[in-house]
Amino acid sequence: MANFTETQLLQLKAALQKRYLELQEEIRNELGHANDPRNADLTEYLNTIPDDIDTALVDRQINEMRELEMSMKYLRELEFGDCIDCENEIGFDRLLAYPSAQRCIHCQSEYERSFPQDSGSSL
Ligand SMILES: [Zn+2]
């Protein structure tokens, strides 16, 4: 795991959780489920989305939430902050700005070149 101070870890954890809640909120707004049970966890929540709703609307948010879940798992397992491709440090500033980042800037641009459909700008 990258070398973070305890303060940095707390900041990153807060950024992850904040982003996660924001996405949850975006999904709810997008799908018009404003008065959903507050404590339902997301997996359950997603299962309640009717099939006839176009989930493409929220695909980006759902993907990012999955990445955030992965990051939170890494954080618990103390494997957080390393690029999944080259294993170098992703960097504190980048993680704070993009808490769901799984790759360093270099590998991310390589990845987006190889898989342009995953970069989220197809609309
Ligand atoms: Zn990398």
Image (cartoon, rainbow, N blue to C red):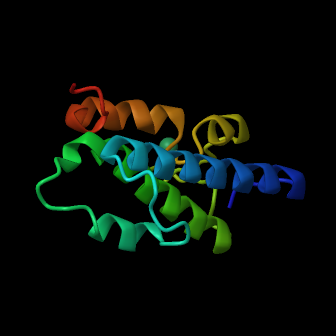
Viewer-proximal residue, 85 or 64? Answer: 64
Residue 98 at what x, y percent from top left? 57, 39
Q: Residue at x 38, y 70 (%)?
A: 43
Q: From where the camera sits, is residue 121 visible?
A: yes
Residue 9 at what x, y percent from top left? 78, 56
User: Relative to residue 40, is residue 29 depicted above or below?
Assistant: above
Q: Quadrant of the N terminus?
A: bottom right
Q: From where the camera sits, is residue 81 visible?
A: no
Numbered circles on residues, count: 0
Viewer-proximal residue, 115 or 119? Answer: 119
| Residue found at the far front of this picture | 35
Viewer-proximal residue, 57 or 13? Answer: 57
Q: Residue at x 55, y 71 (%)?
A: 39
Q: Residue at x 28, y 26 (%)?
A: 121
Left or right, 35 with reference to 56: right
| Residue found at the far left of this picture | 52
Left or right, 40 with reference to 74: left
User: Relative to residue 49, is residue 90 depicted above or below?
Assistant: above
Residue 106 at what x, y percent from top left? 48, 32
Residue 56 at what x, y percent from top left? 20, 44
Left or right, 40 with reference to 122: right
User: Relative to residue 117, is residue 65 depicted above or below?
Assistant: below
Q: Quadrant of the C terminus?
A: top left
